[in-house]
Amino acid sequence: MSGDRNFLRDIITSDSLQRESVHDRRFVDEVKIFSRQELKEPSEEQLKQLTHIQRTVTMGDKMYKFSHEYYGSVDYWWVIAWYNKKPTDAHFYLGDDIFIPFPLEKAISIATKEG
């Protein structure tokens, strides 16, 4: 299992002919861009396979901090974002409940359409 959320995404190369004005200004020949990753909406049956810990968002809380606290790595913040259906920290407000899903491996499997 990879902590890198981009491990299943395709890489698209954009050369200077496609984006001539941008590349010329920065002296860049090509740019590699990740394709958009569609995370799977879990079914009720899949949700039954997961449990979660509930926390209340306080000043200074970030998903990467929760990821480090509960998963031992900041790399899994996106799993918390996916589970809560809030793509960035800015979508949480003080006092909101945030849910950290477990087991991590199963959550990743469901989110990335592996399971």
Image: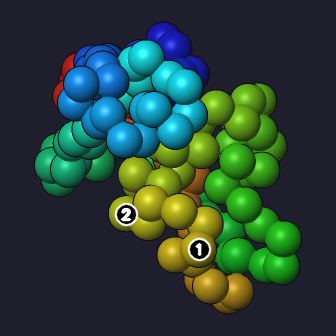
Give the residue at x 45% y 32%.
24
**Residue 115, which numbered label?**
none
Give the residue at x 24% y 25%.
17
Q: In this view, does 93 lie above or below 89?
A: below
Q: Is residue 57 above or below residue 12?
A: below
Amino acid residing under circle 1: Ala
Query: Residue 66 at what x, y percent from top left?
Result: 72, 51
- The residue labelled by disc 1 is 90
- The residue labelled by disc 2 is 85
The quarter in which the C terminus is drawn is top left
Task: Name the image quarter holding residue 56.
Answer: bottom right
Q: In this view, does 99 lie above or below 91?
A: above
User: In the figure, is residue 99 to the left or right of 56?
Assistant: left
**Secondary structure beneath label 2:** loop
User: In the figure, is residue 75 to the left or right of 35?
Assistant: right
Q: Which of 73 and 24 is in front in this view?
A: 24
Query: Residue 64 at what x, y percent from top left?
Result: 70, 48
Q: Which is more N-terminal, label 1 or label 2?
A: 2
Amino acid residing under circle 2: Lys
**Secondary structure beneath label 1:** helix
